[in-house]
Amino acid sequence: MTTLELLVTAAVHPVPGIRSLTLAAPDGRDLPGFVPGSHLVIECGGRSNAYSLTSDGTAPTSYTVSVLEVPDGSGGSRWVHRELRVGEVVTARLPRSLFPPVARAAKHLLVAGGIGVTPIVSHLRAARTWRRETEVHYVFREGRGAHVDDVLALTDGAAELHTDRAEFCARLEKALADQPLGTHLYVCGPAAMIDHVLDTARGLGWPESRLHCERFGLDALDPGDPFDVTLTATGTTVRVPSGTSLLEALETSGVDVPNLCRQGVCGECRIPVAAGTPLHRDLFLTEEEKAAGDALMACVSRSAGPSLEVPL
Amino acid sequence: MTLTEPVTEVVPPPAPSLPDWPADPPAVDPSATSYVVVAVGADAGTREVAGAWVADAEGRAPTTLVVLDAVADPRDRAELTEALERARTGVRVMAVGGQHDVLAVLTAARDAGAIDAELAAYCTHTDDLPMYCAHCRATHRVEARPGEEVTCPGCARVLEIHAHFTRALGSFLASDAHAAGLPGPTGARP
Amino acid sequence: MTALASSAAELIAGFPFPFPEDRYRYSTNVEPAGRSVSTPAGQWGAAVVDIDGEYAAELAERADILRRDPTRAEVLPHMQPAAWDAAMTLMRELATAYPSTMTLERLGDARWRWTNGLLGLTQEFVYGDGGTLPEEPLRWIAGQVQEDVVLLDQRDQLYGDAGVVTFAADWSFGFDVGMSFLEIHGPVPRVREEGVITRAHEFLKRLQPHQPYRRTNWTLTIGRRLDVSTELYPEWGPDREMIQRVDDATFGRLVHLRVEVQHLVRLPDSGAIMFLIRTYMLPLELLATVESWRRRAAEVLAELPADMADYKGIIKYRDRAASWLRAAGGEAP
C-alpha cells in the first residue's frame, strides 16, 4: 500500500486565497498515522503536489491540508481551488515525514511565514499532547493569516503574531538570543524569510543541527527524464518512461534483476553499464565507482543522456 | 505551492568507539555568543589551559569560569548545574582536566541539553576513566586504560576494560576478564 | 536455559534459515517486511511480529530477567511518546497477524480497548496517559511479544534511547542505551571499512512510516540460551571452552544456529525507529535433518573469515561445527 484514495469531505476558504480540504477514507476507516510536520503528495489534475498536513496525526480518521492558490504556478493549486469539489476522490501517496520535531529538544522555537504555518500547526498539536515547551512567531500579511485561530488556541494565546516585517525581524533577533540550552528552531515560509531566520540564528551562535527548515519548491518527487536502455545480450531496446524506474522497466520486459530494498541502499540490483552515462541517485556505490560509470543501481538510478547500454 | 525535500549532507560521520581527544587544547569557537569554561582539579596544566581559554573568550563574548575540585562533590556539582541552566543557546562549553573529570563534565552538559557542536574539551592526562561494570551495573573511577584489567571496586571481579565507549553515560564498558580463556565480549551486535 | 515447549517439527517449520549463499559477509541485507518466505521445511516472515509455540515460555523468561535486572529495560524521558507509539504499533501488528486472538478497538478519540486472548488480558487505555496502563507502555507491550525492542531517536544521528532487551546476543543494552547507532557498531570488524553500517544508517534515516523493512543476522549459541548478554558472561562464557571437550552427540545437541529476524519500522506518530529483534534457535542435530540447510551451513561456517568468526565468538568451535554438519550428511569432514 503506497497510495491512498481519499474522499474530499469538506472544503472551506478560511482566508482569501487559501482553500482548506478535509480528506477521509471513502469507507470511513482510520487513515495511516503521520509524524508532525509530514506532507501529503496529492495528484492534482495531472500533477503531484505536496501539502503539509495540519491535522492531528495520531490514529487519524481524516486529514486536513491548506492550499494557497499560486496563480502563476504549475497549475496544481489552481486545480484544487477551481476544479476539485466536495464528494470527489483524489489519489495521494502515504504521508511523508521530512520536518519532524526533535524529541530531545528542551524547547521548540517555531517560526512561520504565511502559508508556511501549516506544518507548524501540526507540530503544535503534538506539542500539546506531549506537553512540550514551545514559543511561536508567526508573520503574515494583514488579513491573510491562515490558521491564526488554531495557532492561538494551541498555544493558549501565547503565540506572537506579526504583520510588520521590521517589527518581526527585531523581535526574532531578541528571541533567538535568549533561548535555553537545548532549544531547537523550526522555520517554514518563503525562501527569503527562511534564509533570514537561519542566518540570524547562525550569527547568534546556533549550531546547524539545532536548525530545521522546510522550503517550498517545485516538485516533491523527481520522476526523472525518460530514456532508452538497450540490452546487448538480446539486442532489444526498452523504453524507461519518466516516473518508472529502470528496474521496473527491466522486470516488465522479462529481465530478472536480483533486488531487495528498491531504495538504492542494499546493493543487490547493481547492473553493469556497457555504454552511456549513468545518472547515479543511490547510496550504495562509492564516489569512485560512480565516477567510473561502469555500473549502476537499477532501482533508483537513471541515464544522464537519451540512452544506456547494459550487457544483459 | 509544493515542498521539496531538504538538502541533506551525506557525509559519513566517523564511528568512534573511543573518545577522540585533541592533542592540543582546541581553539575558542569565535561564532559563540557566550562561553562557559569548566576547569576540574588544581594542577598547573589545567589552570594554564583554562586561563588561556578565558583570556581569549572574554575578548569575544560574556564568559563564565567554573573551577571545581571534584565533579562528584555535591557543591561543585550544583555550581556546574547552575552555570549550565543559566546558559543560552549560542553558548560553548569548554572543559579541561583529567579524562575522568572531563567526561563527567561533558555528560552533565549533554544532560543539560548541549550537543557536540557546543562542546570542546582537553584532557591533561588519560590516566583514569569512568568504567561501567556490566556485572554490578555501576560506574566507577579507575586508574587504567582500555585493554587493561582491573579489579571492580563494586563487585571485586577482575574486569577487562573494552575499547567501547559511550558518550551518553560518559563511560567505558568493562566485563569479566576470566570467565573463559577468550577475549571478553565487545558489547555490540554479533 | 529455556525449557522447550514446542516440538522439533514446529521449530524446524518456522525457522528462518539465514544463508542465501555458501559464503557469508556483512551486507546491508534489508528487504521489505511482511513477505512470506518458503523454506524446504515450512515458511517464515509473513508478519512483523511472530508468535510461536515458545510464546508463553519466552514471555515468562523475559519477565523473570526483568525482575532480576531492571537495566534490561529503559525509556529515557524524551522517548515517552515513542514508547506509546511502539505499543500502539505492536498492538496493531498483533491484531492484524492474529485476528482470532488479538483485537484493538477504538472506544473514543484517544480511548482504546486491547484484548490479548493468548494471555487472557483485556486492557482499556487512553493513548498518551501513563496512568491508564499497569506499567510503562514499552515494558507493558514487551510482555506480550517475543521480540526484543529498541527505539531509536533521530536527531543528527540515530540514538538507541529506549528499549526492552532481554535476549541480547553478546551485548549490553544497559551500557548501549543512549549510544548512537554508529557508536554501537564501532567494534564490528570490516563493516566500517566496507561502508555497510554507514549505508544502513543512511537507509534508516530515510525510512518512512507504514513501509517496514527486515533483515536477518546470525551467530552460534551453546545451549538453548536466549539471554547471552554481556551481563551474564560469567555464566555462559565458559561454555565456549566446555563445548570443545564434549562428544559428537552432545555437540550436535548443544550447538545452536541462532538467527535474529530484525524488523525496522518508522513509527508513524513519534517518528522514532522501532527495531525489533526476534531470536530463533535450532540445534545442529535438527538443522541437519534438512539436507540443503545442513550442506549450506557447513560451507558458510568453514569459509567464514577468522576475524568475523572471532567477533561472533565462535572461532574456537566453528571448524568443528562445520565438520559435524558435513559428517552428519556422510561427507568427508
Image: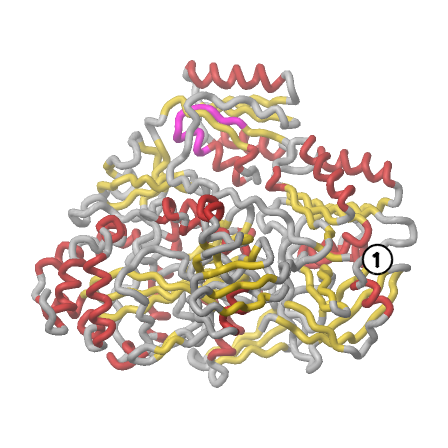
Q: How many marks?
A: 1
Q: Quadrant of residue A28?
A: bottom right
Name the residue at 51% across, 29% down: B120
Name the residue at 57% across, 44% down: B9
Q: Within 10 Å of the Cα at label 1, are there few (<14), some (14-19), or many (20+) other Cα atoms?
A: some
Q: Which residues are magenta?
A: B94-104
* Residue C160 in sight here: no
- In the image, taking residue A181 as reference, residue A177 lies left or right, namely right
Tell me where residue A246 appears, x and y as whole percent: 53, 64
Q: Quadrant of residue A167?
A: top right
In the image, is residue A180 part of the stretch drawn in magenta? no
Q: Which quadrant of the rendered structure holds the N terminus of chain C?
A: bottom left
Name the residue at 65% across, 22% down: B62
Tell me where residue A58 appears, x and y as whole percent: 64, 66
**How did the renderer colour the structure?**
secondary structure
* Residue A111 in sight here: yes
Quickly name the residue at label 1.
Answer: A70
Give the chain letter at badge 1.
Answer: A
In the image, is residue B100 part of the stretch drawn in magenta? yes
Question: Which amino acid type is shown beneath numbered disc 1?
Answer: Val
- In the image, taking residue A117 as reference, residue C234 lies left or right, namely left
Q: Nearer the viewer, residue A289 or A155?
A: A289
Q: Nearer the viewer, residue C110 or A122?
A: A122
Q: Quadrant of residue A221?
A: bottom right
Q: Nearer the viewer, residue A17 or C70?
A: A17
Helix, strand or loop under label 1: loop
Tell me where residue A202 appears, x and y as whole percent: 67, 34
Tell me where residue A50 appears, x and y as whole percent: 71, 61
Q: Which quadrant of the rendered structure holds the C terminus of chain C?
A: bottom left
Name the residue at 45% across, 69% down: A234
Vertical position of residue B65 compared to residue C5: above or below = above
- In the image, taking residue C5 as reference, residue C185 lies left or right, namely right
